[in-house]
C-alpha cells in the first residue's frame, strides 16, 4: 500500500481518526508521518547500530582477510564486534578499517574527523613536563621562603626549558 | 591533590550539584547543560574487553596524571567498585555518574576499577564504556561554558596521558557512534507547553531530521517523565566541535521559542483551565501524604510551568530543581538514614516535598 500523502513510499503508519463521529483512515509512510507529527514507535530513537551492523555485515565479503583476522592487540575480531557493537581496543580500528569506514559513513554521514587534532605526549616530553612542574614548585617554595637568589636561579632554568 | 575515601557527600565540591542553582541562561526551561568528551588511553584494551588488572592499572595511571591537572585540583576520587549500591544510586540520581558506571544497569554489572573524580562542575568518569568520560555540567542553557571546561580538562589531561587518536577517524571510542570528536553536548529541558499543545511529536521529529536526538531524564534508555527531555547531538564525526555545538545551540534555541509560543497559546486559549490544573498540582505536592516518583515528577512539572508563567508566585526555580533531584529514592533513603521500601519511600517523598514547600515556598498564595 502506498502512502496517501506522497504516493511514493510504502505506508507503514495506519492512522484511524475520529472527527465528529466520522471515521477516516490515513495510511502514511514513515517520513510523511513524521512530517505530520504523528508519533510512532518507528520514529522513536533506537540504537541504530544493530540494524546498520547487519547491513554492513551483509555487504562485507565473507572472505575479507581483514575481517577474519583477529586484532593483534586485543584478539577481538569482526564477529565479536557484531555481537557486542563495541570494539575491543584502539587497534581494532586498524584491523577492521575498511568495513568500519563504511559503517562510520552510515552512522555519521562521514568517516573523516575534522575536529581537534591531537598529538599524544611522547615519554620524553612527559619527563620534561615533570621536570618543569618540579622546578615551578621549587621556585614557589623559594619565593615563599624569601630565598630570592635561589628563586632567580630557578627562574632562569625554567626560562631555558620553556 | 585528590582525596579518596568512602562516600561522604559533604566532601563533594558543592555536593556536585551546583548546576541546579538556576543561575544560568533560560534556567526556567533548561535545567542544565552537560558536555562530555569520550577518551581512551593508548596501551589498554577498551573497558569492556580489558581485564580487571588492566582497568586498575589504567585507573592508577589516570590518578597520577590528574594530580598535575589544575582544573581538577581538589577533586574527590570515588571508587564506585568499592561503594554500596545506595551510594552509587545517589551519585546516579545527581547525574554525576552514568547508570552503566554505577553498575545499576542489569546489562552491565559493576566493573572493577569503576571510579569517578569529581571537581567543581567537572568530573572524570573512569572505566565507563570508554576509559574516560570528561564531563562538565552548567546551570541553564550554557553550551559554551560547559565546552570550555571539558575542553580544558581534555587539553590538560591529554598532555599527561596519551589518548588513542587516529588521523582519519579522530579520537577512538569503544562504540563507533562516539568516535571522532567524542563530543556529546546535551541539555535537560522542560517542555510541558509543547506536550500539552500536542506539538511535541512534531518538534521531536524535526530534531531528529536536524541530527539531534532526545532521551528521558537519565539519558540513554530512560523514559520521559515529568515532561523533561534530554536533547543532544546524534553524530560525533565529520563535524568539528564548534559545528556540533552550534547545531545544538541553534536547534535548542528554536525549541525554547516553540515552547514559549506554546505556553502563550495555552494561557490565551485555556487560561483558567491551565491555572486551575497547575494550582491543583501545587496543592497535591503541598499536602499529599504519599507520592510516587512519577507522580511527584508530573506535579513538579505542573508547578514549574506555573512558576514559569508567573501564575504561581513566591517559589524559586532553584527550589523546584532541588526537589527534582532530592525527592528521588536514594536521596530519601540517605535523608532517612536507612534503606526504604517503595511505600516507605513514597511517604518520605511526600514528607520531604511538603517540608521544602512549606519553608521555601511560604510566599505562595
Image: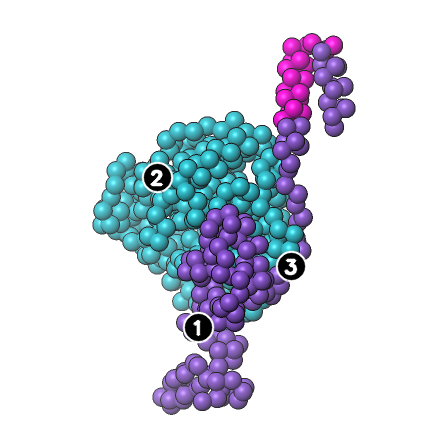
In this figure, which residue is indicated by the disc labeled 3?
A: A112
Q: Is A46 covered by the magenta stretch?
A: no
Q: Tell me the chain of label 3.
A: A
Count of labels in the image: 3
1 vs 3, front mark:
3
Q: Earlier in the sequence, mark 1 or mark 3?
A: 1
Pointer 2: residues within 10 angstroms few (<14), some, or many (20+)?
many
What residue sits 46% from the left and 28% below the top?
Answer: B3
What residue sits 54% from the left and 50% below the top?
Answer: A91
Give the structural element (helix, strand or loop) at label 3. Answer: loop
What chain is colored cyan? B
Q: Report, in whole angstroms, how far the alpha carbon at label 1 lies from the one at label 2.
A: 37 Å
Q: Is residue B72 visible?
A: yes
Q: Is A142 covered by the magenta stretch?
A: yes
Give the image location of residue A39, x and y in percent: 44, 73
Residue placed most toward the observer, B365 or B110: B110
In this figure, which residue is indicated by the disc labeled 1?
A: A42
In this figure, which residue is indicated by the disc labeled 2?
A: B87
Q: Is residue B21 visible?
A: no
What residue sits 44% from the left and 44% below the top?
Answer: B50
Q: Contact, CB < 8 Å: mark 3 with mark 2?
A: no
Do discs 1 and 3 share a chain? yes
Give the structural element (helix, strand or loop) at label 2. Answer: helix
What residue sits 48% from the left and 55% below the top?
Answer: A70
Give the image location of residue B268, x and y in percent: 50, 69
Q: Which mark is residue B48?
A: none
Q: Tell me the chain of label 1.
A: A
- Left or right: residue A38 versus residue A156 is left
Residue placed most toward the observer, A102 or B102: A102
Pointer 3: residues within 10 angstroms few (<14), some, or many (20+)?
some
What chain is colored purple? A
* First to last magenta residue range: A130-149
Amino acid at each position: 500500500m502506498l502512502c496517501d500523502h506522497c504516493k511514493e513510499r510504502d505506508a507503514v503508519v495506519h492512522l484511524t481518526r475520529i472527527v465528529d463521529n466520522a471515521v477516516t483512515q490515513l495510511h502514511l509512510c514513515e517520513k510523511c508521518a513524521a512530517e505530520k507529527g504523528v508519533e510512532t514507535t518507528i520514529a522513536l530513537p533506537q540504537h541504530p547500530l544493530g540494524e546498520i551492523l547487519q547491513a554492513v555485515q551483509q555487504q562485507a565479503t565473507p572472505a575479507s582477510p581483514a575481517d577474519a583476522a583477529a586484532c593483534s592487540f586485543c584478539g577481538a575480531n569482526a564477529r565479536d564486534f557484531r555481537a557486542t557493537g563495541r570494539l575491543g581496543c584502539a587497534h581494532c580500528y586498524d584491523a577492521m578499517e575498511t568495513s568500519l569506514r563504511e559503517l562510520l559513513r552510515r552512522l555519521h554521514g562521514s568517516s573523516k574527523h575534522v575536529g581537534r587534532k591531537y598529538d599524544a605526549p611522547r615519554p620524553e616530553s612527559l619527563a620534561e613536563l615533570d621536570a618543569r612542574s618540579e622546578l615551578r614548585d621549587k621556585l614557589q617554595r623559594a619565593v615563599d621562603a624569601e630565598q630570592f637568589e635561589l628563586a632567580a636561579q630557578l627562574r632562569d632554568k625554567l626560562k631555558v626549558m620553556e | 591533590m585528590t582525596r579518596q575515601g568512602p562516600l561522604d557527600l559533604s566532601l563533594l565540591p558543592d555536593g556536585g550539584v551546583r548546576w541546579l542553582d538556576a543561575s544560568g541562561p533560560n534556567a526556567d526551561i533548561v535545567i542544565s547543560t552537560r558536555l562530555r568528551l569520550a577518551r581512551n588511553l593508548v596501551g589498554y584494551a577498551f573497558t569492556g574487553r580489558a581485564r580487571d588488572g588492566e582497568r586498575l592499572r589504567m585507573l592508577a595511571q589516570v590518578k597520577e596524571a590528574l594530580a598535575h591537572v589544575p582544573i581538577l585540583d581538589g577533586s574527590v576520587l570515588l571508587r564506585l567498585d568499592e561503594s554500596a549500591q545506595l551510594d552509587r544510586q545517589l551519585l546516579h540520581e545527581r547525574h554525576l555518574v552514568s547508570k552503566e558506571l554505577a553498575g545499576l544497569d542489569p546489562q552491565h554489572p559493576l566493573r572493577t576499577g569503576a571510579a569517578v573524580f569529581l571537581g567543581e562542575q567537572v568530573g572524570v568518569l573512569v572505566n565507563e564504556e570508554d576509559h574516560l568520560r570528561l564531563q562538565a555540567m552548567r546551570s541553564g542553557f550554557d553550551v559554551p561554558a560547559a565546552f570550555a571546561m571539558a575542553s580544558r580538562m581534555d587539553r590538560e589531561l591529554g598532555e599527561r596521558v596519551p589518548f588513542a587518536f587516529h588521523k582519519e577517524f579522530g579520537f577512538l571510542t569503544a562504540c563507533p557512534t562516539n568516535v571522532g570528536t567524542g563530543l556529546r553536548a546535551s541539555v535537560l529541558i522542560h517542555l510541558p507547553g509543547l506536550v500539552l499543545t500536542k506539538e511535541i511529536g512534531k518538534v521531536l521529529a524535526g530534531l531528529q531530521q536536524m541530527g539531534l536526538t532526545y532521551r528521558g531524564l537519565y539519558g540513554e534508555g530512560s523514559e520521559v517523565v515529568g515532561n523533561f527531555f534530554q536533547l543532544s547531538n546524534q553524530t560525533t564525526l565529520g563535524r568539528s566541535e564548534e559545528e556540533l555545538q552550534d547545531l545544538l545551540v541553534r536547534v535548542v534555541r528554536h525549541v525554547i521559542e516553540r515552547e514559549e509560543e506554546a505556553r502563550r497559546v495555552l494561557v490565551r486559549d485555556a487560561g483558567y483551565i491551565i491555572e486551575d490544573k497547575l494550582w491543583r498540582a501545587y496543592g497535591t505536592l503541598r499536602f499529599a501524604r504519599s507520592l510516587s516518583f512519577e507522580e511527584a515528577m508530573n506535579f513538579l512539572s505542573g508547578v514549574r510551568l506555573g512558576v514559569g508563567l508567573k501564575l504561581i508566585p513566591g517559589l524559586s526555580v532553584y527550589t523546584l530543581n532541588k526537589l527534582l533531584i532530592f525527592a528521588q529514592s536514594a536521596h530519601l533513603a540517605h535523608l532517612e538514614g536507612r534503606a526504604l521500601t517503595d511505600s516507605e519511600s513514597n511517604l518520605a517523598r511526600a514528607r520531604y516535598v511538603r517540608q521544602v514547600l512549606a519553608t521555601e515556598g511560604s510566599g505562595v498564595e
